[in-house]
Structures are given as C-alpha cells and as structure tokens.
Amino acid sequence: MKRLLLTSALPYANGHIHIGHLVEYTQTDIFARYWRMTGRRSIYLCADDTHGTAIMIRARQEGRSEVDVIADMSAAHQRDFAAFQIRFDHYGSTNSPANRALCEQIWASLRERGMVTTKEVTQLFDPKEGMFLADRFVKGTCPKCAAPDQYGDSCDRCGSTYAATDLVEPRSALTGARPEVRSAQHLMVAIEPERPFLATWTQGEGRMPKEIANYLAGHFLSEPLRDWDVSRPAPYFGFEIPDAPGNYWYVWFDAPIGYMAASKEWCDREGEAFDDWWRSEETEIVHVIGKDIVYFHTLFWPAMLRAARFSLPSRVQVHGFLTVNGEKMSKSKGTFVLASTYLKHLDPAYLRYYYASKLSSKVDDIDLNLEELVNKVNAELVNKVVNLASRSARFVAQTGLSAAYPDDGGLFAAAAAEGEAIGAAYAAFDYARATRSIVSLADRANEYVDRMQPWALAKQPEKKAEVQAVCTVALNLFRQIVIYLAPVLPKLAEDVARLLGCPMDRWELAKTPLVGTKVAAYEHLMKRVDPGAVEKMIAESRPAEEAGAQGGAGAAAAGAGVAAAGAVAAQAGAAQGAGAPAAASPAAAQGEAAEDDGAALAKEPLAPECTIDDFTKVDLRVARIVAAEHVPEAKKLLKLTVSLGGEARRTVFAGIKAYYKPEDLIGRLVIVCANLAPRKMKFGLSEGMVLAAGDETVHLLAPDSGAKPGMRVH
C-alpha cells in the first residue's frame, strides 16, 4: 500500500476548540487509526493557523504580542485534542520558519510561471487604527433594506450581499471611527490558465464527494476563474512578502502550506525525506475539510501545488456542518459547547462514538441530538458491547480462557468474515455503515450469551468446563467487536487489552480466537451516560445572564431533550383505556424546557400519606428489557420481556407504542414493580409495571450506572 499523509483543516488560533470542530478531527483520527491497524504507513499532521488581522487585533486588545497569544492557544488546542484521543504525529504552527521557507519557495514558482499580477484594490480604512478593514470589521446600515448594524459583506435581515463601501453610514467595528475609502496595490494570483487542468482534476474518480465535484463544475469551473487576492498591506500579522516590502501574504495563502511545513518538521525529526511525502507517487495525500472551505482546497491549493511541482491530494474528503438538536449551535441555548466544557461532564468516548455512527462519505450535515446521544451510547455501547464482558469475564477470572476454542455455531468465523466489509467502510469514510455492522455483531453475541446463560451454569459445579467454554466464546466475540471499534474507541481497546492480556492494535487479530490465556479481574469499562451530566454541560455553556434567566444550572437544558425523570409511576396503559399495567416513555420534546414551576405537582397532587410499612410492600427492582415487540391487535401497546437477572423473566404490556420503537428499547435498564399482581389481558398475561414520570409527555425511569438486573430499589 502507498504511504498515507493525512491532514485536517488547521484550527484558527483565535478561538478554542468546540464540539463542532471535533467532527472533523474525530473523522480524520478514525481514518488514520484504521489504516495504522492494517499496517499501512500513515501519518496524521496538523498545525495552528495563526496569521491574520483577527490575531493582531486580539493581541493589541490584550496588551500582548501575537506570538504569546498563539502560543497559549496552541497549548490549549493540543490539550483538548489529546483529551479527545485525537492523535497527531506532529502538530505545528503556520508561524514557523519551515512554513516561511515553503511559502517563499512556492511564491517563487508562481512568479516564475507568470501567475502573479498586481491590482489596485479599494477598501475602507480606519484612520484611528491606521489599517485597512476586512469586511467583518466594518458595520453600517444595509444599502438594500436599511437594516442597521450590519457587517460589511452581507445583511442578516434581507440576505443581500454587497461591498463594504456600499454600506450606509459605515463605522469601524474596532474604533467606531467613520472609515475612509482608500486604495492600495494588492498582489494577485491568476488561476484562470489552470482552469482546464482543474476541470479535469476535480472530476477524477474518488477525488472528492460527487456532490462537491458537481458543485465546482457548475458554480466555478463553468466560467473564467477570478484572480485570487493573496496579499494584505501593513499592518498585518503574517509573513512579509520578500519581493513586495510592506505587503504580507494573506492568511489563506500560507495556511494550507502549513500542511507541508508540519510535514517538513516531522521529516526533520524522524530522519525522513520530505520529497518522499510531497513529491512521490508512492504517497497518497488526503485532506479532510468542512464544506465551507472547499474552493480554497480544490481550486487555489491544487493550482499552487502544481505550479511548484508538488504532489496533489488524492482525495479531499468533505463533511457537513454540525447542528445540535436540529438547530445551529447556540450560546444562548447552551449548545455552543467548548471541548473543555464537555470534558468536565462527559466521557469523550461518547462523542467519538456518536459522531462515528453519523458520519458517512457524503457531505450531509450532522445533528447532535443530545437525547439520542444518551440513548445510543447506553443502549449500544454499554448494554450491548461492554456488557458482553461484564456478563462473562468474572466467571473465568480463576480459570482463564479454554485451551482450545469451543464450538460456537460459526459465530466467530462469521464475525471474522465481516472484518473486510467493516474495514472497507472505514476506508471509504463511511463510519455509520461500519458501526451498524459492529452493533449487529454485538446483537448476535448477546443472543448467544442470553441463550447459554453462564450465570446459571456457574451455579452448577459439575458444569465448570461448560462455563469456561461459554465465556471463552463470549469474550472472543467481545474482543472481535472491540478490535473493530478500536479506530473509534482507542481507550476502550487499551482497557480490553489489559483485561484479556492481549494486543488489540492490529486489524488481523480479529481473525484468530484467543485461547488459553488469563483474564484479569473485571473493572468497569464504560459508564452509562447520565442525562443530568448533559444538562449541567448545557447549563455551563450558557452565558451567565442566560443561565440566570432560565433558573441557572438547576433548570433543564432548553432544547437539550434530556430532562431528568422524577420518581413517579405512570399507569399509561390504564389511562389510555387499555387496562394493562404500562410503562412510560421518552424524554421531553426537543426545544421544550422542563421548568420547576409547580405545574406538574398541581396537576397531580400528592397521594394520601403512607407508612414505611406500606412502602416496603412494593418491590421495585432493576430490570433489563431483553425483548420488545408490537402487539398487532392493540393500537398503543408494546409487549416487553424484562429480565430480573438470571432466568427470572417477566412479560409486561406497556402503552408506549406512540413513543418508542421496539428495537430502541432492547438492552435498556428500567425500574419495575416486580410484585404487582399479574393481570390477564386478551393479549396475554401482564406480570408487572415499568416505572415512569410525567403526564402528556412521560419519561421512562432508568437506574444510575452500575445497577444490575435484580437489584432492589430501597
């Protein structure tokens, strides 16, 4: 296989990493980790994008040098990335000697090919600050609809675009001064001569998602390409252009060259030849970017590389934007979440897995539905994957795994055969397909464990060998699944490697069962997501005044859809006329705040006082839903089979068809009233009641992480 050089877009040094950024870096990290597991020589490089007016202005406002500002931001960025298990082979900076040297080299090539011209550019100038103003630093009245306080390139109210010089009563956003119209010489790069080449290159098979190739062909390459303005006059934080004193390369000129500079620094450190990575047919270069910066990476960048005779990227993988609960990330709603804030409350593995389950090779936007995050991680990762180990490892802590792999009816061989398809999905950036296949393997493995019931066999001394055999199969199926998940969940793979005393870092290991080895004492591999922790994260992400207005951290997150359930049993089936003890349902609708205003208590007042003796008559137990299905004859009922641990199973008919899909319930822990008198119905015998809270919108109750089926609620 060719060497792989992989990059993500460089994060700008003027802000901290947030959960929207993490879509891209998680996507790229998974790709790099998969290929490393196959044995392919792969490096993942990144750097901070450090130049530009915004950094210069921030440094002035803070009374510091630009170098100090970007150094602090680089440390913060790398700290956040490391905490989210994003592994770079090298992390650099565009404000580096290596980047300056490569900028000069590529600039010389553009000059040599006659691609550099000059042009008089008219802009607004702040006389107080002594600088030309980028559009985002100018505000005024929209010339089309007269909306006040609009930026210098477009109107938020009417959507019109215009030149900053067209604004009515413009003012500098920096000083408030009325800007003057001035002109300056700018350096331009003519890329129109490269249009025939770019028209062919962008349409190459596998070069980029098809919708992006079509977009470029229809919007840019169907007409002459405009010259690219690549310079800015002083004052500007960046590299001064050697043959144009007083002018600096625009940030978008030196930012992509930062990929190469990071490569050069890595090569110098590792004793590698730079040309082996940027001038070799034996290296595949892949960029992963967001859809908002496509034209920089697919038009200007390849033109620059070609002019300087460097290798062009083999693929530009493009992803969409992140929304949260169906909307743009919002500071006022607390959904603009910084990486550092997330880390205070939640395991980074949750977000890595959720993003992987949503990412495909297409350019679709990704929605982070916070209620779905809770349910997906708990139902799939905890209940299906991790529970395979927790239900079997302790039974072989003394004996270890069987000396020979037992007969499992072909389960291991079938999962091994699926490794190629799962790997192909990773290689195609289709992580959603990969995770679906892996969860399907976990379902089959759990069916095996449910059928063999090692906990029941362990109670029979004469079946010690059978217990070892069953657990050997279960743990090997679990090991396969975690190997397949290792690109997404590297820490889980490391923890499992310690549990089973085996390597988990090569894809081919999933083809061969592990036998005759010791098993360490089982320790929790992953906790369930606590909806309360999600609420606290959202509350902390709101501005202080917004949090105060909505009741502070104690209020439920607006739009989060993760309101914590209260401890009230809802007989939804009876209320619906079904006559069955019933369960309740999903959390509050998205965008609806659960407010502690007393309305719920007023609507359903407290029941008459009871004694402790009355309470102890009700036997509340933790149970796991092991099966769920529709009741064809009933409009509102689902038939649930719940496990109270071991062989103890109960059937419960619940009026929740309007709220839950049966497949989403399987594996979920709930609280049931276990000693409720059975009730005969025309659909069958209902043997309990699942606890819930609410009225029109009801909430299924779930125990905290660590609870096991059969535990009594006291």
Image (spheres, rainbow, N blue to C red):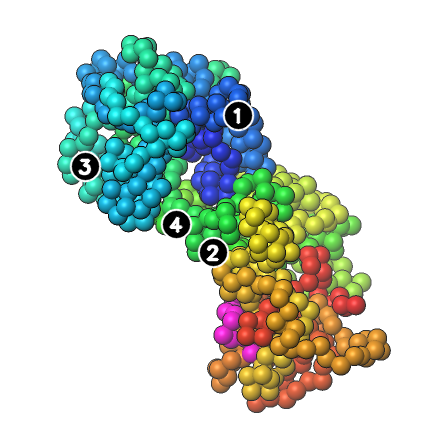
- SS category of the residue bearing label 4: loop
* Disc 1: which residue: 62
Query: Separation of disc 4 and disc 3 at Cα?
Result: 25 Å
Gap in angstroms between the C-alphas marked 4 and 1: 36 Å
**x and y percent of residue 535 in the render?**
60, 54
Q: Amino acid at mark 3?
A: Leu
* First-in-chain label (3 vs 2): 3
Q: Which residue is mark 2?
A: 325
Disc 4 designates what residue?
365
Q: Earlier in the sequence, mark 3 or mark 1?
A: 1
Mark 2 vs 4: CB contact within 8 A: no
C-alpha span from label 3 to label 2: 36 Å
Q: Tell me the residue at 29%/10% (across/down).
A: 243
Q: Nearer the viewer, mark 1 or mark 2?
A: 1
Residue beneath disc 3: 221
Circle 3 or circle 1, nearest the eye: 1
Q: Which residues are magenta?
A: 655-664
Point 26% across, 48% down: residue: 145
- The amino acid type of the residue labelled 1 equals Glu
Q: Position of residue 546 (x, y in %)?
A: 55, 50
**Horizontal and vertical percent for residue 77?**
53, 32
SS label for mark 1 = helix
Q: Quadrant of residue 506?
A: top right
